[in-house]
Amino acid sequence: MGGIVGDMSKQQDLDYSKIQARFATRMPLTSANVAEVIQKRLLKKAEEAEGAVGELYDAHENDMRTLFGFSTGVQFKTYRDRDHFIASYPFLPYQYDLFQEAIRELSNHNAFEGRHASVGERSMLGVFQQVVRQIKDYELGAVAPFDLMFEGIRSALKAGVQSSILLAERNIENELAQRILKALFLVKYVKQFKPTLENIAVLVRERFDGDAVKLTRDVEAALNLLEQQTYIQRNGSVYEFLTDEEKDVEEEIKNTEVDNSEISAALDQMLFGIGLRTNKIHHEVAGAHYPYAKHVDDQLSGRDYELKINMITPFHSEGGQVERFRMQTMNRNELCVILPEEERFLRDLIQLKKTEKYVRQASTTNLQPTLQRIISERREQIEQRGRALELSAKRLLADARLFVRGQELDIPGEDGAGR
């Protein structure tokens, strides 16, 4: 009411307290209340079915947390016991709370048509009923995946809000990718939920006895497809649904050109400034410190010295030719550090530099409030991605191959600078 008629503490043309006073009994519904109503009125099993569902619980009791537990972010409830499982099946306990929060946040972000501006627990009853009808022919052992909840609110959503999903349904043949996009749409504004690869796999899981490894692999492939076609974006390990405005910005970022010199400078800072953290080599026996020349992919960065550390990154035009780099050290005072080839590190670094350049350019122009918000979010992502890349650079240094005078050094350890 407050959202519709304004400040209720002030005198209004219509005094709603008079209307409320006519109803002596008020029944606020929480998600727990709704779950109980759904279980008793919608999911009550026939007596013979209770036994079969109970046997399903007995077979998978020890797998519940592994199959349907979220790896990061808020931890949702799981089944309390056998009776709770029988009452709630084929739904999972987390779905009541997560869907309630999802529709509340979507409503706060004006995703619903006017007459559905206030979406609460009562809407959950109809959505769960619709999902049950969709899966009524599933065999025992199946569960209701979270993405099916989207179908229950589709008709109430504004056309512009779901345009990306409609476009994906027409242009993407990968059904799992479509389902993932719908799930990511639902959780877009739920801050406590972290849509990582593992958590997304939980959202779209359809069976207790499915191949978990294959599902994760298929989900990752579908996410890569959605990211390539700019339906979603990845920020570190977290994936996010893109609205139309965000999609346009992301396309512009992808089309932004960055010089190789900017990439090299970023690699120099991450590998030497943050990874090694020192400008000199300490000789323990002599007790002396020697400056060294910094090379990134055979290119000198900064001042030249007799001793060299040469970082060979996946950006090198001859990357992968380990023998070529080993032979190169035969006649040089050089430590050659060959970093593992990791495609994600490359993509993320390029995306970071493109985003930085786009944000710099966009900050000099007058923008609409919506675009200002998106640019502000991208500015925050730059910091997050930068920190994630720094951690990745340290890990790559720890796993790098080291060569001196044609010999590969066997130096164990998880700290790149220490090695």
Image: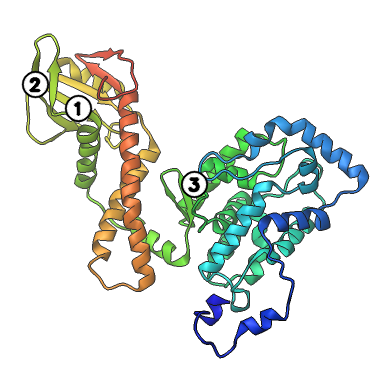
Residue 277 on image: x %, y %: 20, 30
Q: Percent x, y for residue 418?
A: 26, 21
Q: Earlier in the sequence, mark 3 or mark 2?
A: 3
Which kind of residue does numbered mark 1 sit on? Asn
**Disc ID at residue 224:** 3
Whether residue 120 is situated above or below residue 354 in the rendered picture: below
Total number of numbered discs in the rendering = 3
Which residue appears farthest toward the right when viewing the image?
Answer: 48
Mark 2 or 1, nearer chain start: 2
Residue at left offset 34%, top offset 74%: 368
Q: CA separation, marks 3 and 2?
A: 45 Å
Q: How did the renderer colour the structure?
A: rainbow
Task: Characterize the local packing of mark 2: few (<14), some (14-19) or many (20 or more) Cα atoms within 10 angstroms.
Answer: few
Give the labeled residue for mark 2: 290
Question: Is residue 323 or residue 206 the one in the foreground?
Answer: 206
Q: Give amino acid for label 2.
A: Tyr
Most foreground residue, 57 or 7: 7
Q: Return the residue nearer the eye: 180 or 89.
A: 89
Q: Amino acid at mark 3?
A: Asn
Is residue 135 visible in the rendered image? The answer is: yes
- Compare marks 3 and 1 and give the one earlier in the sequence: 3
Residue positioned 15% across, 31% down in the render: 294
Q: Position of residue 203 (x, y in %)?
A: 62, 47
Residue drawn at point x = 39 percent, y = 38 percent: 343
Kindly identify which numbered label has been placed on residue 310: 1
Answer whether labels 2 and 1 touch (C-beta < 8 Å).
no
Picture coordinates of residue 36 (x, y %)?
76, 54
Q: Nearer the viewer, residue 187 or 176?
A: 187
Quadrant in which the N terminus appears: bottom right
